[in-house]
Image (cartoon, rainbow, N blue to C red):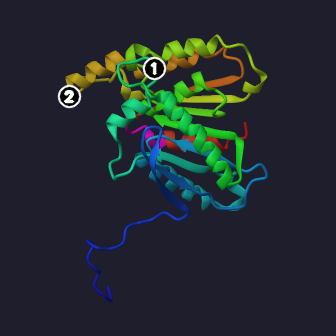
Amino acid sequence: MSSPVPPLVGSPGVRLARTHRIDLAEAAGRPRRLFVALPQGPVPHRGHPVLWTLDGNALFPLMSALLWQRSARPADMRVALPVIVGLGHPGEAAYEQTARAEDYTPPPGPAAGQADRLLDCLAQLQAWLAHQLPINATQQTLFGHSFGGLLTLYALFSRPALFQRYFAASPSIWWGDRAILVHRDRFLQRPADGGDDGRRLLLTAGSLEEGAAKPLADPGRERRQRERRQVGSARELVASLAGAPGLRAEFRLLDGQDHGSLVLPSSALALDLATART
């Protein structure tokens, strides 16, 4: 090496190109941080698809890196890539547990159940984004993991027109004595509406989240797995939506993944869903 390597401490941090961060002093009852990643290439004829991701502090860096990697593909292999918007919180922590337990939970339930307040916020942010960028208002996807997946399901069941595509990665169906199933039932009782045609739901769970081949080292974790039935609950929920008018629901079991590790393959699948033609 011709010259010494400078000290690691004090060297500049890594910044992904074409990304932005906006802090909001107050939105839906608390400070929020918006993360936005812009795709490379020309604007599609109908505008950019949009992929909205919850838990933005933790998931936006991953999503934006996947977007950057796909932007580097040869032009003939590229699809119309989405704008990615992450909704998070100020600070460096990956998750703000108290806030997400309130923001991502529907009423009624044991926590504050502020999901409607957050969905109002997302609707306002959709309008804001439409004034900032040429976007396709008919190709917007909401992605959430765990409690974020619970919020994603609630958004579909309570405001199906807010997004066209919904991705719930290992959603917390167990929460609140499975209160989300009440909202599912109301959704299924809605009269058919031709405007709902083409709506999609993709739900994932990891094969290691339930029924491990050998006892887990943590008895408490093993008990929670039995009670929550992440895999079985996800399968049953998707099966129950088979007759929902205008909705195509799909379940995918991700082999070898647990509740945390399935975030990576689910994020890649979310980009696929956001850019799929149908």
- Label 2 Cα crowd, 10 Å radius (few <14 / some 14-19 / many 20+): few
Characterize the local packing of mark 1: few (<14), some (14-19) or many (20 or more) Cα atoms within 10 angstroms: some
* Residue 260 place in picture, x, y as percent: 37, 37
Q: Which residue is mark 2?
A: 217
Question: Residue drawn 56% across and 40% down?
Answer: 270
Q: Is residue 197 above or below residue 257?
A: above
Determine whether 219 is above or below 256 in the image.
above
Q: Secondary structure at mark 2?
A: loop
Question: Which circle marks residue 6 in the picture?
Answer: none
Magenta span: helix, strand or loop, mainly? loop
Tag 1 secondary structure: loop
Q: Is residue 163 visible?
A: yes
Question: What amino acid type is highlighted by mark number 1?
Answer: Pro
Q: Taking 192 as reference, is 67 left or right?
A: left
Q: Which one is in front in this view, the residue at disc 1 or the one at disc 2? A: 1
Q: Magenta residues, as a range?
A: 258-265
Q: Give the mark nearest the N terminus, 1 or 2.
A: 1
- On screen, 257 above or below 111? below
Q: Residue at x 32, y 23 (%)?
A: 213
Between 133 and 81, the residue placed more toward the observer is 133
Q: Which residue is mark 1?
A: 107
